[in-house]
Amino acid sequence: MIRHLLSAADLDRETATLVLDTAGQMDAAMAGREVKKLPTLRGRTVVNLFYEDSTRTRISFEAAAKRLSADVITFNAKGSSVSKGESLKDTALTLEAMGADAVVIRHSASGAPHRLSRWVSGSVLNAGDGTHEHPTQALLDAYTMRHRLGRLDGLNVAVVGDVLHSRVARSNVLLLHTLGANVTLVGPPTLLPVGVEGWPAEVSYDFDAVLPKHDVVMMLRVQRERMNDSYFPSAREHARRYGMDARRMAMLPEHAIVMHPGPMNRGMEITPEVADSPRSTIVEQVSNGVSVRMAVLYLMLGGSRPEEV
Ligand code: NCD
C-alpha cells in the first residue's frame, strides 16, 4: 500500500480497486452492527489539520477515523497558533512530537500536503489543496458510480462547470482514467484550465450535445471565492448554458445519474429539482465518503482486517 495519498495519480488501478473493494467491506461490516465502530485502528492517532473551511470532508474524515477506533485530534487553523503566524513546518514538528500516525490536511495552497509529507514520519492524506487535488473525493465519487451503475470501465462521465478552480475535477480525471472510464470536461473556455488538452479527457463547450451520451454527469460548484467576476458574464447566463435543470435531466439516458461534491449553489450550477431527484447521488456521496475514508485509513495505517474483528 502507498504511504501517502497526495494525488489521485498515486493510485494505480490495482490499488484504487483495492480501496473501493475495501470500502464495500467496511459498509458490509458496519451494516450488521448496532454500535457503528470497529476496533481496527485502536491506539493509532489521526490528526485532522484544516487550514481551509470544510463541512463534509472534515466531518467525514473524523467519522471515518472514529469508526475505526483511532484517537482523533481535529485542529482548526482558526483559533490556533497559525493565526499567530506559526509556519506549516513548525506545526508539522509539533504533530510529529505528538506521534501522529496519519495527518489529514486541507490547505488553500496547492502542494502543502506534499511539503508536509517531507516533515512528518506518519502518513499524509490530502483532503484538498488549493485548486490542485482532492483524491479521497475522487475515490468516493468512483465508489458511488460503481455502486449505482455496476462498473467503471467504459463508463462515460461528463464533468461540468468550473473545472478551472476544481481540485475535485482534477482528481476525478486522473482516477477515472486509471479505472478505464471516459471523461468529458464541459464548461465555458474561461473556466477550463490552460493545458487541458494534455489531460486524459475530451473537452466540450456544448452541454446539450454531451447529455444523451453520458452515464454520469458530475456538476461542479462555481467557486466564486477563487475568482473575480470576469470569468463569466453572470450567474444567470452560467445557469442557462451550463446549469443542470429538469430539461437537461430529461435528455440523459434513463439510467444516468447526477452527482455534485457539495457544497451546492442551488439555482446556479444545479436546480433544487435536480438536486433532490432520485437520480441525484449527492446524499449517497456523503455517506460513501465515510466508508471510502475508512478504507483508505485502514489500508494506509495497516489495521487488522475488517472480517477479523
Ligand atoms: C469540494 C472541495 O472542497 O474541493 N467539496 C468537498 O470536498 N466536498 C468542492 C467545492 O468546494 O466546491
Image (cartoon, helix red, strand yellow):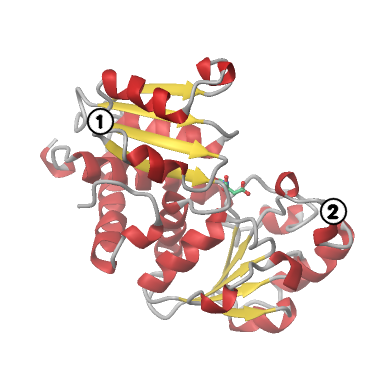
Where residue 292 sits in the image (x, y, percent)? 36, 48
Q: Residue at x 31, y 29 (%)?
A: 34
Where residue 142 sits in the image (x, y, percent)? 42, 61
Q: Image quarter for residue 71?
A: top left
Specify the label residue 229 is tagged with: 2
State yes or no: discs 2 and 1 in contact (Cβ < 8 Å).
Answer: no
Query: Within 10 angstroms of label 1, few (less than 14), some, or many (20 or more) residues?
Result: many
Where residue 203 sits in the image (x, y, percent)? 62, 79
User: Considering depth in this image, is 91 or 43 the residue closer to the camera?
Assistant: 91
**Would you say residue 290 is visible in this rendering?**
no
Specify the label residue 199 is tagged with: none
Amino acid identity at mark 1:
Asp
The residue tagged with tag 1: helix, strand or loop? loop
Instruction: State left or right for residue 249 relative to residue 90.
Output: right
Which residue ends up furthest to the left in the rendered image? 308
User: Considering depth in this image, is 166 or 246 the residue closer to the camera?
Assistant: 166
Query: Within 10 angstroms of label 2, few (less than 14), some, or many (20 or more) residues?
Result: few
Amino acid identity at mark 2:
Asp
Instruction: State left or right for residue 78 relative to residue 134.
Output: right
Name the residue tied to disc 1: 101
Q: Is mark 1 within 8 Å of ligand 1?
A: no
Q: Residue at x 43, y 48 (%)?
A: 288
Q: Residue at x 81, y 70 (%)?
A: 241
The residue tagged with tag 2: helix, strand or loop? helix
